Amino acid sequence: MKLLITNCSQIATPQSSRLVKGEQMKNIALYKNSTFCIEDGIIKDIVPDHKANKLIDENCIMIDAGGKTAIPAFVDCHSHYLFAGQRREEFFMRQEGKTYIDILNAGGGIGNTVNKTRLASKEDLIKKGLTHLDNALSQGITLTEGKSGYGLDRECEIKQLEAMKELDRIHPVKTVRTFLGAHAVAKEFEDRSDEYIDYIIHQILPIIKKQNHADFCDVFCEKGVFTSEQAYKLLSAALSMGLGAKIHADEMISTKGAELACRLGAISADHLLAVSDEGINCLAKSETVAVLLPCTAFCLGSNYAPARRIIDSGGGVALGTDYNPGSCNCFSISLTAALAYFEMKMSPAEILTALTVNAAAALGKATEYGSIEIGKKADILLLDTDDYRDIIYQTNKNLVKTVIAGGDIVYKDGEKKW
Ligand code: NIG
Ligand code: FE
């Protein structure tokens, strides 16, 4: 099928099939009054409207964008979206002075969600996941990460990953799965975190790889959770089995997580609120994506990650939501973009790059997703504006009118179409 979308007042897009770093992040292409053509789910052409006629043939369906702006669909490259229950009480306890790590170490936090997720059936999780993915789609996300990490035992970790495999099959928003068994020490291994890491390496990882349950392995490397040595041991094992590596790095204090991620060749180092100067230098020299999550800093009331210093030093930044029931019960792309602009001083063009092709790079998908270029997958948004920068200027409004995923219109004017 051939689809021609004409009369886009603006097409705004990064132009890359890999991580965009440093000052290149602000280089985006802007086409005025243009048409793009999709065939078999792939972008085939981008031409000025006055040349659209030559692309028309008897099989093509034409859609008038009515002056809307086209941008690549958003990629949420850091998300813990599949869990049971909620943690409202802890959320409000934090305002009364308890820290996230205090609550975690008192058996709340992640452990609280683990208890509920262990009790949930795979079908319950799929049902909840469908609601989340519908909401994600309505704000223009067509590719998301999905981390496990609320099972902390073989059975429940695999249950979470299998639920996300099924969600990926049935929903137009695609899920890249990350195994996060090392999200916290399971209560069965209390005070025996080394043994828990060995249990993951020997009893879970081989099955994850063999049965293709996940593409990446992640670890919460933080004081009071897992040490850098434990993270190194786990991720080296994961890499040797052919999984990619990710790290929750330097979220509360610096544990040299960014340095470790670069040394291992991890695909991403995530959070980085407390990244060291050395960590910033390492990121600048590597292809490891610095995944920044401003909604988490907002919800925890902490300082924001030093996006400017990372980009100005030559690093490549992606933005994600970090949606989870504890530190960030929010998956708003609008708020992520606004905080990146106002608090982290990123420019609109850098934010577009960070939410699209760089986020795709953090999931190993930049050759397919993240830009409107010939040969890329047609995952495209039509925004109700003539200037892409309105994703920041009009923070209060969902500008997403149409979502195209894999060449199909899957959402239009507030309704799903699949
Ligand atoms: O990225 N820091 C670890 N993991 C999540 C929080 C998960 C939770 O609290 O349930 C995060 O902030
Ligand atoms: Fe996280």
Image (tube, rainbow, N blue to C red):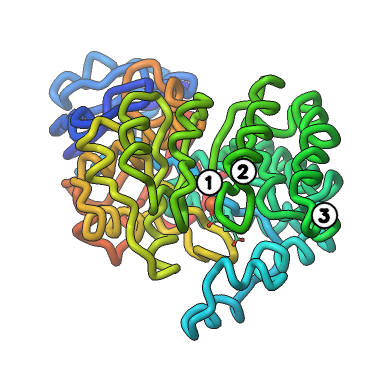
Ligand 1 within 8 A of label 1's CB?
yes
Report the residue at 75% width, 26% height from top: 209
Viewer can see residue 65: no
Label whose residue precedes the other's in the sequence (3 or 1): 3
Rendered image: mark on residue 189: 3
Whether the residues at callouts 2 and 1 have beta carbons within 8 Å, the answer is yes
Whether the residues at callouts 2 and 3 have beta carbons within 8 Å, the answer is no
Helix, strand or loop at disc 2? strand
Label whose residue precedes the other's in the sequence (2 or 3): 3
Q: Furthest-bottom residue in view?
A: 96
Residue type beneath disc 1:
His
- Is residue 317 shown above or below 412? above
> Which of 65 and 195 lies nearest the eye of the viewer?
195
Helix, strand or loop at disc 1? strand
How many residues crowd mark 3 within 10 Å: few (<14), some (14–19), many (20+)? some
Q: Classify residue 103 as left or right of residue 281.
A: right
> Which of 372 and 101 lies nearest the eye of the viewer?
101
Helix, strand or loop at disc 3? helix
Label whose residue precedes the other's in the sequence (2 or 1): 2
Q: Which residue is mark 2?
A: 219
Residue type beneath disc 3:
Phe
- Nearer mark to the viewer, of 2 and 3: 3
